Image: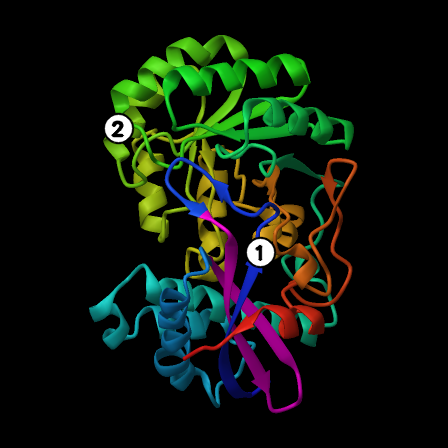
Amino acid sequence: MKIKSVLPFILHVPVTDAQIADSTHTISHWGVVGAQIETEDGLTGYGFTGTHAHLPSDQLIARCIETCHAPLLVGENASDINRLWHKIAHNPALQWVGRAGITTLAHAAIDVALWDLKAKAAQQPLWKLLGGQVRDKVRAYNTDIGWLSIADDKLVEGAKRAVAQGFTGIKIKVGSTVGRDLRRLVAVRQAIGPDVTLAIDGNGKWDLPTCLRFCRAAQDFDVFWFEEPLWHDDVKGHAQLARATPIPVALGEQLYTPDAFSEFLNQQAIHWVQPDVTRMAGLTDVLRVCETAHAFRLPVAPHAGDMSQVHVHLSYAHPACEVLEYIPWIKDCFTDPAEVVDGYFRLPRLPGAGTSPTAAAWRQYRQATA
């Protein structure tokens, strides 16, 4: 599988509503910034990262793929995924300008495209290539009903509707005011009953005193986890919070390296581990985090199954992965979409990683890369 070409692409896909908001961002489109890798024998692999669809920023990632990563790959054997990962990750020129951020997001797209190629060459879904199916079902929890931009009554209606559709897990956003967020938490818990898991997500907004005050008031409502309660890199603060509240702490979507995860794990600052193949340097890097979490006997909940597609394969194949997030903004852009049926992600069927865009998505959502 000799690599013939590496080309970037950008898709901007509308979110479910006109726009959504969490505690730190308001967006109307999701950015799919990716790499299309073609081999000399005619196979094409696709991988991508995820952004808030800001075209100048997305073009920076695409430019990094085209000018920094592609020259390292053309002529190489696409099946040598580990060697190519190290060739990119430990390239002195790239390390000098950044070991996270744009260079890592671009690397994520490359690495996933290589895994997609390898699975297609084997004529297998990626989960088979990763060792096979370790569980019968992957439980989905619905985040798309829980945005802070949704009015209280609509939030409750959406939670009830999701449960009626078969979801056994709900996640709602917090990070506005303690009073408002507690009111919404209580209303949703009362609406969905005691048997549906209910998680919350602060997106890194609050400080430690605010989190402690909120957790004291929320601990009687069986919160499944508190995701990103504090600033993403605050290991000490998360460790203090984890010791002070019975509510489990979850994080990881804004961590770029296994070293960052290891620091949280070693400081006992995390209970649910949430890596993302589109934020770290691809599936190769996330697999290391999953193995480390498994060694710590901690569960993994990869960030957003249908916003990476790959996480569905990972969750079926890796024993540490227990639940997976449902945010269905981009799933229909792919030939083997991350579908949820009766509250569980369907087992992928087609060869590859599920990352091949449909012709319709290519026509409708593609943006200029320069």
Q: Quadrant of residue 233?
A: top left
Residue name at image x 29 percent, y 36 percent: 231
Amino acid at the residue labelled 2: Gly
User: Is 28 colored magenta in this rendering?
Assistant: yes
Residue name at image x 38 percent, y 27 percent: 176
Q: Earlier in the sequence, mark 2 or mark 1?
A: 1
Above-or-below relation of 2 to 8: below
Residue name at image x 60 percent, y 57 percent: 310
Residue with the mark numbered 1:
14
Instruction: Classify 10 Å Cα crowding around label 1: few (below 14), some (14-19), many (20 and above).
Output: some
Q: Quadrant of residue 209?
A: top left
Q: Quadrant of the C terminus?
A: bottom left
User: Along the line of sight, which residue is nearer the eye, 332 or 85?
Assistant: 332
Residue with the mark numbered 2:
237
User: Is 119 colored magenta in this rendering?
Assistant: no
Amino acid at the residue labelled 1: Pro
On the image, the x and y values in percent for residue 293 come to 46, 40
User: Along the line of sight, which residue is nearer the eye, 62 or 240?
Assistant: 62
